[in-house]
Amino acid sequence: MTETAMPSPDAIKVWARLMRVSRQLMERAEDALKEGGLPPLAWYDVLHELAEAGEGGLRPFQLIERTLFAQYNISRLLARLEADGLVKKLPVADDGRGQTIRITARGRETRRRMWAVYGRSIAELVGAKLSLDELSTVSALLGRLRHPPAAD
């Protein structure tokens, strides 16, 4: 029987700090969006992925893969985005039950307005606190924690 590896105290400290800092940064970015009268960050994530996909749009399962939302969460979110006119659901010709989701012009404008606030939050919360060398180091270290590793 193999023994289960236990984390070192340093690994536990890094994990806890990473979770706390991540939550705090996300909350502050969410607060900035809310103060600006803008939708929540989850909306930005979906609008961003759809804008990056171009005119072909994405299927819901692709959005789940790219955003890591649960299926039931993405379904509700897409319903809200569609109701607000930010996305459009289109049938897939060769799949009677399938849909392709595309961002609308209104969705692109909302994404642009959100990015003005979200981008400023990133600049203030991260960019202004770390040097370029430190940013590069943190990025490289976090990249090593990704599974599977991906080029960001």
Image (tube, grey):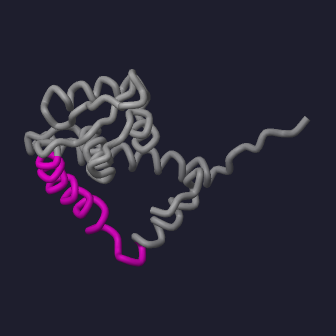
Q: Is residue 126 magenta?
A: yes
Quadrant, the C terminus = bottom left
Residue 103 or residue 128, whichever sits in front: 103
Viewport quadrant of the N terminus: top right
Magenta-tinted stretch: 108-134
Considering only vertical position in the picture, is 102 above or below 146?
Answer: above
Compared across the picture, whether 66 is left or right of 111 comes to: right
> Residue 48 at x, y = what percent?
28, 49
Near-viewer residue (8 or 114)? 114
Question: Eyeballing the image, is 75 above or below 33?
Answer: above
State the predominant SS element of the stretch in magenta: helix
> Is 6 positioned to the left or the right of 126 in the image?
right
Q: Residue at x 53, y 64 (%)?
A: 141
The residue furthest bottom is 133
- Residue 140 in picture, x, y percent from top left: 51, 67
Q: Residue at x 29, y 45 (%)?
A: 50
Q: Position of residue 127 (x, y in %)?
A: 29, 67
- Seen from the viewer's position, the closer of residues 101 and 81 is 101
